[in-house]
Image (spheres, helix red, strand yellow):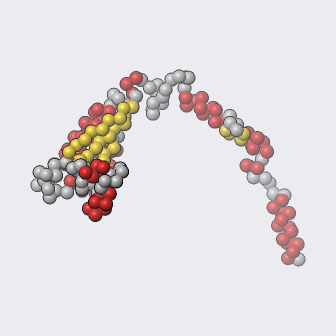
Amino acid sequence: MMANQGFGDLDRLRHRSPSPMASSNLMSNVSGTGLGGWNSLTQERLSGPPGMTMDWQGAPASPSSYTVKRILRLEIPVDTYPNFNFVGRLLGPRGNSLKRVEATTGCRVYIRGKGSIKDPDKEEKLRGRPGYEHLNDPLHILIEADLPANIVDTRLRQAQEIIEELLKPVV
């Protein structure tokens, strides 16, 4: 009797309704070009007229909106204020100050140079290795903007003003 029950389960599995993906008419649509024409339809809708580039908002790109990469270097006055924790002040609690600057301006901010790594022993081991050449320079900040040409300078200036305000030591 137990053996018959096992066969009954097997028969039930064989005669159940097929899954939607196993249906032959759906599988025939999924051939080399995508999901039966859906892929090409979205390409047509997203690309717009041939030969015309689109910017991130979906409007036709103008010549002034080509992205430009600019880097601005700011020195940190460690010699003037040797006991002030500039890295901690720039980062803020859990890095929120730096994240806020990056979010409001669209620029990336990097703390580089001697003292930019929290552990001095680790910094000494990394000095001279490829990718860590900045450790030979004094402590500085790099503000990098990869934005459209018509706004890149104003965003860099905004980030510079915010960071310079953070670099003023609280006495």
Relative vertical location of residue 53 with respect to residue 89 in this rendering, above or below: above
Relative vertical location of residue 118 with respect to residue 25 in this rendering, above or below: below
Compared across the picture, whether 33 is left or right of 100 comes to right
The number of callouts visible is 0
Name the residue nearer the viewer: 148 or 10: 148
Q: Quadrant of the C terminus?
A: bottom left
Name the residue nearer the viewer: 39 or 83: 83
Q: Residue at x 64, y 32 (%)?
A: 40
Counting from the top left corner in percent of width and height, residue 36 is at 70, 37
Compared across the picture, whether 140 is left or right of 31 comes to left
Relative vertical location of residue 122 with respect to residue 55 in this rendering, above or below: below
* Residue 58 appears anywhere in the view: yes
Counting from the top left corner in percent of width and height, residue 64 is at 37, 25
The image quarter containing residue 109 is top left
The image quarter containing residue 160 is top left
Q: Residue at x 35, y 29 (%)?
A: 149
Counting from the top left corner in percent of width and height, residue 110 is at 30, 47
Q: Quadrant of the N terminus?
A: bottom right
Relative vertical location of residue 143 with respect to residue 129 in this rendering, above or below: above
* Residue 105 appears anywhere in the view: no
Most extreme residue toward the bottom, as rendered? 1
Most extreme residue toward the front, as rendered? 128
Q: Residue at x 86, y 63 (%)?
A: 11
The image quarter containing residue 145 is top left
Compared across the picture, whether 96 is left or right of 23 comes to left
Counting from the top left corner in percent of width and height, residue 51 is at 53, 22
Q: Residue at x 65, y 36 (%)?
A: 38
